[in-house]
Image (spheres, helix red, strand yellow):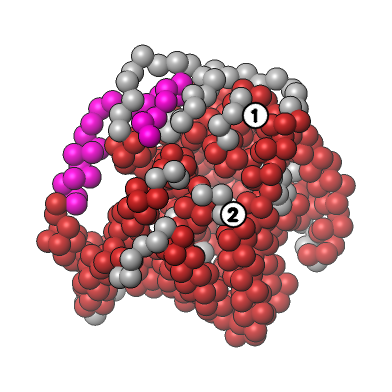
């Protein structure tokens, strides 16, 4: 991998597999801090705010996301994949992102009143004006954070995530206690974005020049364009789900759906995106070695399923005491939503990183087609499902996830020429351990325990012990191998070249 223009390092590079495994653990630590803080914030705010407050802010976030579709044109992944003249590429990407952020901020400010009318929610307008500032705040630190990912410097990136989390939790909760209502959520997001960008500038000594190199711009946009199209359709897919809930079922239902889906999104889906930040750069280094790429993909499925299976199954099976005991009685209608969304996260989690292989080999066109397929299935299914309430919409999400996961598996495994039965063998340990988890949780749930929090603790403990025991009995050598990899002390800071 070509060195980035950041601080050189005297350390020698470690083997790629060790760097990748340690990078995953650093990013999981980052996730535990950032998303754990976000989950804690949601729990606290759920006690201070109403479903309608969350619903109004969800409308504003949907508007921001739809306006910002394709805002970075896939340049984050393009910068990681791009090998020529990195300094010019970084400057070009920074300048293009900043220009686009300025345009989006102006457009959002101008359209805020009309968007509020369109959503039939007057409170959305003022919130949307403030949230338009996130375009500029995020763009200012975008390339710096990409450089950390490109160099697999995830330990350093953890600092930025910690700062973002502390600021968001502090500002959001303080504002909610001061009586700002929905504005507390917006204040927390703005403060967190600004703090994260400032931290990124401190962590990465590179300073951008406002210039656009035409050759680098064409190269970045050529690669990122199709990827941005896939990402844009993904945003439309996710936000269409919220729009259908909000339009057909109202702001309170939207708030309930948003909060109920927060746990699967924070714990499962964000794990996927965080892991992608490590695996995609690693896959890029293996793209010229098909056998190693195939082995890396199957190992990824095997290792990641050991983590995602207990998380998603655990959420689905403990949804009842989790909602009533943690969020409160006003959110109980979201129990079935949490169960279905947790289950829908499982097929996505098991096949998500197969998309990283498609990206690393330049087959972003296949990713785009799969996203289109998922959207074609999801939208009509949700329109029909909304007639059955929140549960119907969540069931539509589960259906679309199953279809997209099947397509990703077929295409990516064929691309790397994986033998028949390879994916089943990779998933077998977690599937068997997951069955033990489900049985343990179901049996412990039959105990006559009145307190939902105590019941949740008992069910969680029983499931974790059953899953851990079965997995250890079948995968002891694999777990010990991972532990040995993690125990290596050397890392590869920005400015070094990875072993191919």
Percent from the top left, x then y, of residue 170?
52, 38
Q: Earlier in the sequence, mark 1 or mark 2?
A: 1
Mark 2 residue element: helix
Horizontal side, residue 122 vs residue 472: left or right: right
Give the magenta range. Answer: 478-500
Q: Which mark is residue 364?
A: 2
Q: Is residue 57 visible?
A: no
Percent from the top left, x then y, of residue 169?
51, 41
Pointer 1 local density, CA inside 10 Å: few below 14, some 14–19, many at least 20? many
Q: Which mark is residue 89?
A: 1
The residue shown at (42%, 58%) is 416
Pointer 2 local density, CA inside 10 Å: few below 14, some 14–19, many at least 20? many
Q: Is residue 124 visible?
A: yes
The answer for how far apart the CA atoms under marks 1 and 2 are is 20 Å
Percent from the top left, x then y, of residue 330?
52, 69
Percent from the top left, x then y, of residue 357?
47, 52
The residue shown at (64%, 67%) is 372
The residue shown at (40%, 50%) is 290
Question: Quick one: 45 or 400, which is closer to the camera?
Answer: 400
The residue shown at (37%, 54%) is 294
Horizontal side, residue 415 vs residue 298: left or right: right
Q: Which mark is residue 409?
A: none
Mark 1 residue element: helix
How many marks do you count on the picture? 2
Residue at the far left: name it: 473
Task: Let me know if residue 206 is in the magenta part.
Answer: no
**Relative to residue 332, is residue 148 depicted above or below?**
above
Task: Let me know if residue 497 is in the magenta part.
Answer: yes
Q: Quadrant of the C terminus?
A: top left
């Amino acid at each position: 991998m070509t060195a980035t223009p950041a601080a050189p390092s005297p350390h020698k590079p470690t083997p790629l597999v060790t760097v990748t495994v340690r990078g995953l653990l650093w990013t999981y630590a980052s996730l535990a801090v950032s998303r754990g803080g976000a989950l804690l914030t949601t729990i606290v705010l759920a006690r201070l705010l109403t479903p309608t407050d969350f619903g109004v802010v969800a409308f504003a976030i949907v508007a921001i996301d739809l306006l910002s579709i394709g805002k970075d044109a896939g340049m984050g992944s393009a910068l990681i994949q791009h090998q020529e003249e990195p300094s010019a590429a970084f400057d070009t990407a920074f300048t293009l992102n900043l220009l686009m952020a300025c345009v989006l901020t102006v457009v959002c400010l101008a359209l805020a009143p009309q968007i509020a009318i369109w959503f039939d929610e007057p409170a959305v307008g003022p919130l949307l004006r403030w949230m338009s500032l996130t375009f500029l705040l995020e763009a200012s630190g975008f390339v710096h954070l990409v450089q950390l990912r490109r160099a697999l410097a995830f330990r350093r990136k953890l600092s930025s995530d910690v700062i973002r989390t502390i600021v968001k939790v502090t500002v959001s909760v303080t504002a909610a206690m001061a009586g700002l209502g929905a504005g507390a959520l917006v204040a927390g997001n703005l403060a967190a974005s600004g703090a994260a960008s400032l931290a990124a500038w401190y962590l990465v000594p590179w300073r951008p020049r406002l210039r656009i190199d035409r050759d680098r711009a064409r190269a970045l946009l050529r690669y990122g364009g199709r990827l941005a199209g896939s990402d844009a359709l993904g945003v439309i897919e996710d936000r269409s789900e919220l729009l259908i809930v909000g339009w057909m079922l109202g702001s309170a239902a939207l708030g309930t759906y948003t909060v109920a889906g927060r746990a699967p999104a924070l714990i499962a889906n964000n794990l996927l995106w965080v892991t992608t930040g490590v695996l995609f750069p690693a896959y890029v280094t293996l793209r010229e070695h098909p056998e190693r790429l195939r082995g890396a993909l199957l190992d990824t499925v095997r290792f990641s399923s050991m983590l995602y299976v207990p998380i998603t199954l655990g959420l689905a099976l403990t949804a009842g005491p989790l909602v009533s005991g943690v969020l409160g009685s006003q959110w109980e209608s979201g129990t079935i939503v949490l169960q279905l969304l947790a289950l829908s996260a499982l097929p996505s989690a098991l096949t998500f990183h197969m998309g990283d292989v498609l990206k690393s080999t330049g087959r972003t066109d296949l990713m785009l087609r799969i996203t289109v397929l998922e959207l074609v299935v999801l939208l009509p299914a949700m329109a029909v499902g909304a007639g059955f309430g929140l549960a119907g919409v969540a069931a539509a999400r589960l259906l679309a996830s199953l279809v997209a996961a099947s397509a990703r598996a077929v295409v990516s495994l064929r691309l790397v020429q994986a033998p028949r039965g390879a994916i089943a063998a990779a998933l077998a340990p977690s599937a068997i351990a997951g069955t033990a988890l489900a049985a343990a949780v179901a049996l412990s749930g039959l105990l006559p325990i009145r307190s939902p929090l105590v019941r949740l603790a008992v069910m969680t403990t029983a499931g974790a012990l059953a899953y851990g025991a079965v997995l250890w009995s079948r995968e002891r050598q694999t777990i010990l191998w991972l532990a040995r990899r993690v125990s290596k002390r050397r890392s590869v800071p920005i400015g070094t070249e990875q072993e191919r």
